[in-house]
Image (cartoon, helix red, strand yellow):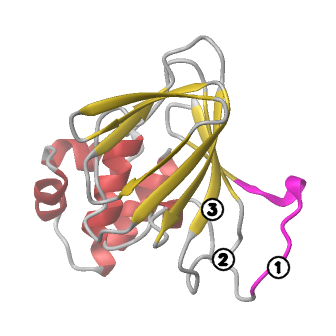
Amino acid sequence: MEEIGKKIKQIRKNKNLTIRKLASSVGCSNGYISQLEKGYVTPSITILKKISNALGIRLVDFFLEEQDEETIVIRKNERFEIKYPQNDASIFMLTKRVTDHSMEPLIARFEPGSGSRGQYSHGLGGEEFGYVMSGKLHLKVEDKEYILEEGDSFYFKSIKPHGYINKTDQATEVIWVISPPTY
């Protein structure tokens, strides 16, 4: 987590943002941002998403380096895995490069009890599609909650507040496609 904190601090400084300005944009305290940058606290995925939006970057930029050339095929053992800070969920990137792409496909794996820890939206708009490969996912879009099981799919506008959680005792895997890329 210390590495993410260092990246946040570096990007914040490169954009000439104060801790106070970033904290205000994210909706948290100055102290929390300071502790995060020093690696003392572990943020939720919702907070990381808000920070990436405030910094004008994608969430995935905290975790990987952009590839210079386009890769056509990604083998299963070549997927890049992003572990959520609480280590109870993972995202497996299904492409290596997203800069020039109009969509971002990934596999999201949620361990029992894990999820977004609240609702968020993508201020830039866009759309999201998902297909539940295994398990059950509780998806909340605006004020409505849906329980999706294996074989079910969803589609919604990313600007709508949304959140998700695995309320079962087994892992859930979802193929998730986001357009434009936001992770």
Spatial CA distance of label 2 from label 1 is 10 Å
Considering only vertical position in the picture, is 141 above or below 112? below
Q: Which residue is mark 1?
A: 72
Query: CB atoms at circles 2 and 1 under 8 Å apart?
Result: no
Q: Kindly identify the residue that appears in the image at 21 percent across and 34 percent down.
A: 143
Spatial CA distance of label 3 from label 2 is 11 Å
Q: Kindly identify the residue that appears in the image at 16 percent across and 54 percent down.
A: 23
Q: Earlier in the sequence, mark 2 or mark 1?
A: 1
**Amino acid residing under circle 2:** Arg
Q: Position of residue 51 (x, y in %)?
A: 30, 57
Of badges 2 and 1, nearer the viewer stands 1
Q: Which residue is mark 2?
A: 97
Q: Kindly identify the residue that appears in the image at 47 percent across and 54 percent down.
A: 4
Q: Nearest the camera: 7 or 54?
A: 54
Query: Which segment is the magenta one?
Result: 70-80
Q: Position of residue 123 (x, y in %)?
A: 25, 65
